[in-house]
Image (spheres, rainbow, N blue to C red):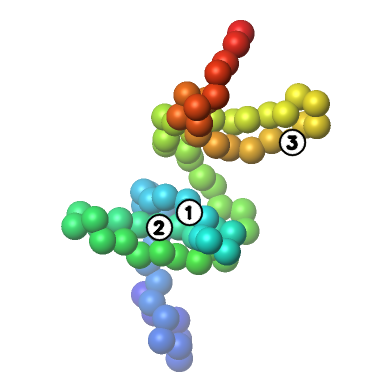
Amino acid sequence: MKIKNKPITLTSAKGTKGCLIATMGGKFMFRVYNKNYEFKDYDIHHFDMNIVIDDEDAFFHVNTDTGKSWIDYSAPTLGLETED
């Protein structure tokens, strides 16, 4: 599919597996690898896209004092000790 009178093609992204990456400038992009491990990075303009996290080492972190929350690696990966 192509946008009329513009050099832009459209392909559905539904079902595409990729990585959400942060650039050195703090901008988020979506990276898609092909079977040869070459990749293409896409700027994200969609403001409410559904995302499924499929990474066993991704954990929700919540600071119980401030309420601040983020997603990061697991405690062992970050070299942090845990307690129950």
User: Residue at coordinates 55% horizontally, 24% vertically from top-left?
Assistant: 80
Residue that mark 3 sits on: 68
Q: Is residue 66 left or right of residue 74?
A: right
C-alpha gap between disc 3 and disc 1: 21 Å
* Contact flag, marks 2 and 3 (Cβ < 8 Å): no
Which percent across, then down, holds residue 7? Answer: 41, 86
Element type at mark 3: loop
Residue that mark 1 sits on: 21
Assign the C terminus to one quadrant of the image.
Answer: top right
User: Residue at coordinates 19% horizontally, 57% vertically from top-left?
Assistant: 36
Task: Report the mark closest to the observer, 2 or 3.
Answer: 3
Front residue of this view, candidates 12 and 18: 18
Mark 1 residue crowding within 10 angstroms, few (<14) / some (14–19) / many (20+): some
Q: Earlier in the sequence, mark 1 or mark 2?
A: 1
Front residue of this view, candidates 43 and 75: 75
* Contact flag, marks 1 and 2 (Cβ < 8 Å): yes
Assign the N terminus to one quadrant of the image.
Answer: bottom left
User: Residue at coordinates 63% horizontally, 30% vertically from top-left?
Assistant: 61
Q: Earlier in the sequence, mark 3 or mark 1?
A: 1
